[in-house]
Structures are given as C-alpha cells and as structure tokens.
Image: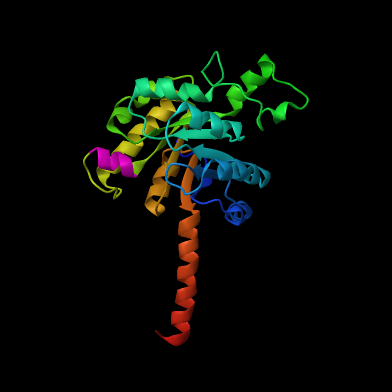
Amino acid sequence: MVGARSPELAFWLETPNVPACEIAALLGYRIVVLDMEHGVFGPEACDAMVAHCRAAGLTVYVRVAAAERLLVQQALDYGADGVMLPQITGAAHAAEVCAYAKYPPLGTRGVGYNRTMRYGVNDHTDDAFFAAENGRVVCHAMIETPGALDDVDVILALETVDGVFIGPSDLSMTRGRGAFRFTADDQADLRLVAAAARRAGKMLGLPAPGPAAYALAVAEGAGYVTVCDDLTALRLGFAQGLEVAKQATGR
C-alpha cells in the first residue's frame, strides 16, 4: 500500500570513514551505500568497510563504479548485502549486467571462496547455499537514463532485479532538463518509476535532498531513502562550528 510505512533511512559513504558509519548507526540509520562510482576509496578499503558496517548492524549496499562483472562480483564477495548498478541504458543492458549478481541458474555470478562463503570453513556451499544467497543478496538497477526510464517495467520484471534506485540528477540531465531542481517534470519521472516498482512488487529506493523529496518518497512507498552522506555531514558540522564563532564575536 502506498505510504503504508516510512522508508528505512540510508546514507551515502564517500570515504572509508569508520566513525561516520558507527555514528550513523547509533543515530538510527539502517542502510549505508558505499559509493564506488563517485566516492574516493578503492577495493581494499571497500572490503574493510563492508565488514565494519555489517558489524555495526548496518545493511550494506555497494554502488559499483560501473556495471561490470568483476566489480559486481567483488562487491558481493566482500559480503555486501546488495549492489546498485549505475548507468543502465535499457532492458537488454540490465538483463546482462544484473545477472552478474546472481548465481546460476538464475544468473551468471562466479563462485569464489571468500567472506560470503565463510572462507570455506565448515563448508556449506551446496545447492541450498547458492539459492539462499541469491535470495539474500539484492540487485538494484539504477534508473538514470532515458532508455532505462522507457524500459523500467521490463527491467523490473527481470528475475535478477530486486528493485530500482533513481538517480535524479543524471536522469534530469540526460532528459535535457539540466540540473535536477525537483520540478514537476522531475517529480513525474519519480512517480512513474515508483508506480512501476509497485506493479512489480519490488523495492524502490529514492534520494531525498530535501523535505519535499522525502515526503514524495514516503507517499510513493519507497523502501529506503538516502538523506545524507558523510562529506555533507562533515561540512555541516564545520559550518555549525563557524556559526558558534560568529555568534560569539558578532562577525
């Protein structure tokens, strides 16, 4: 039912910052998205951050740098709970790359002994394990191009797709509207994708850069909403310190 419950709160992690994740978890955030596309940390740091964040009780999604087999498999081998695949161009592209996140016969994910498989200790990698892992791990296709928007129903119908996340800035830019300003056209695109997710019975993720966007996410039944990131939180903290100094000195 649309608007039946509040979405889970999520935040973006742009740097390998353990305290930021611990603080966010203590404050009530439930999901962290490690941003390998626009963030500034590499695979070794991502591997460590997945372990730290899961230990802190956070659900961990990794937005991979590109929708490529190696990057998707590595993120999942680190133990991430899911992946977000950027710059999906349409249904055919989604069918190919989202399969990287699921083991055969559902998808084409390769098998490696790693954290996900408990490093082979007390080996339990039978057919039941692979089926359970396909159910545990989520793959969210990002809707941020005109082709993906046109094909959203077909993308959501794929068995390898568990949900979608909208990239509103890229979507606005690629649809010729320029920078995202939460215009009526922007909102119409968000609602179009939300309706498709409801029809498919799959997860919807939305960014909420402000109260109006958050209200729309709630109204449209988003499962999770990204409301902040570690660098913005740091900037706001420093800005608050400057405000204290201004109030004290009158300057």
Q: Which residue is more in the foreground, 216 or 241? A: 241
Quadrant housing residue 207: top left
Image height of 44 relative to 76, above or below = below
In this rendering, does residue 8 appear at all?
no
The one nearer the camera, 190 or 245, is 245
Q: Residue reaching furthest right?
A: 122
Q: Residue at x 61, y 51 (%)?
A: 25
In the picture, the quarter occupied by the C terminus is: bottom left
The type of colouring in the image is rainbow
Position of residue 55 measured from the top left corner of the image (x, y, whole percent): 68, 44
Magenta stretch secondary structure, dominant: helix
Q: Is residue 137 left or right of residue 160?
A: right
Quarter of the figure with residue 59: top right
Residue 205 is inside the magenta segment:
no
- Say which of 220 and 156 sits in front: 156
What residue appears at the point 29 percent right and 27 percent down from the top-left corner?
150
Q: Which residues are magenta?
A: 169-175
